[in-house]
Amino acid sequence: MGDLDLAVRGRTYREPEGRHSMVVRGRDLDAGLQHLIARTDCRSVAIVGLPEQVPDISPLVGRRLLLVDGDSGRLRDFAETAIRAGIEVEWVRSTRPPFERLAAALLPVGGIVLAAGRSSRMPGSQKLLLDIDGVPMVRHVFEAASEGGCHQTVVVYAEDDVKRAINGRAELVFNPDAATGMASSLQVGLKALRPEIEAAVILLGDQPLVGSRTIATLLRAWRREGSRPAVAVAQDDGWAPPVVLARDMWDELFALKGDAGARQVLHGRPELVDVIPAPGRPDDIDTPEDYAKIVRLFPRKKPRQHV
């Protein structure tokens, strides 16, 4: 509120419709608190430039709070008051609003790694366990999500071998209906995301070269003011996963059946998706030939010779 202008999706509203976040300068905090009293659907607040005295912040209870100020003392006093009130709070010591940190705090995104497929075109063992540079393929994918900035990452699985490969490194969600197709796994993953998550980035467990930079690029693009509800990686023939999907699209995902996924929701609706160039490679591994191409990118290290 006030004259603070940040290019963050859902940045500051006076009379928004539906779920939203708010960025407010400290000098406008009284008006911001009145907004919170009137609107229970304001889920998170960033205060930039704190007031000298901490006001009654009870309207902030139940919301997520980010504090930004260059004065350590003011930050400490405000944060301690918020913590005592049971408010979820984080803070940044800075004289300028840090765009990336504000955007991430106001618009948390969850990652869903779809790892419950049957590997029908890959003979032998579960393909998600195949070795890529010394690590099971599926671990490359969830590490890309976590390191790329997802606030929560869930791996949807159907086989115990995949569960063991994750080995407690990510949140696991079992899909008993995996045989019915991708839609059920997608829906199980969405249900597992926490209520504060504003969007989901959907990753395929057989895309080990996506990388954390790809995820970070997608999240930055989705959080930008004016971006569409979905953001995906550009490809010569359109787009490829991973794809970020805003929460207001999830109802359509829950209506899917069988082997349908985000592509079916977005097909023929270019007004819903931004397609952006991103680092990394969206290659998926379906066949032994696909796997052989990927493995060649990781030459075996020569053993050291001991004198």
Image (tube, rainbow, N blue to C red):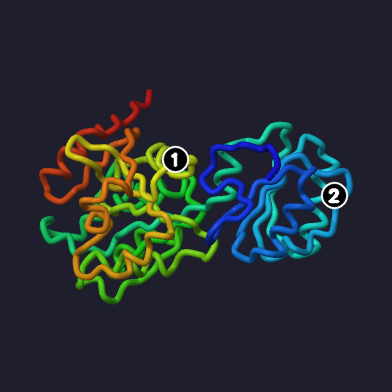
On the image, the x and y values in percent for residue 173 come to 39, 68
Q: Amino acid at mark 2?
A: Asp
Q: Quadrant of the C terminus?
A: top left
> In this figure, which residue is indicated by the disc labeled 1?
216
Q: Residue at x 77, y 59 (%)?
A: 83
Q: Residue at x 79, y 59 (%)?
A: 57
On the image, the x and y values in percent for residue 90 come to 68, 50
Element at badge 1?
Answer: helix
On the image, the x and y values in percent for residue 208 come to 29, 45
Residue 133 seen: no
Element at badge 2?
Answer: helix
> In this figure, which residue is indicated by the disc labeled 2?
77
Marked residue nearer the N-terminal end (2 or 1):
2
On the image, the x and y values in percent for residue 105 come to 59, 49
Task: Name, please, the residue furthest toward the bottom.
Answer: 176
Is 84 on the left or on the right of 304, as rendered?
Answer: right
Q: Amino acid at mark 1?
A: Ala
Q: Residue at x 59, y 37 (%)?
A: 6
* Nearest the eye: 228 or 245: 228
Q: Residue at x 61, y 60 (%)?
A: 43
Q: Relative to residue 6, is residue 270 depicted above or below?
A: below
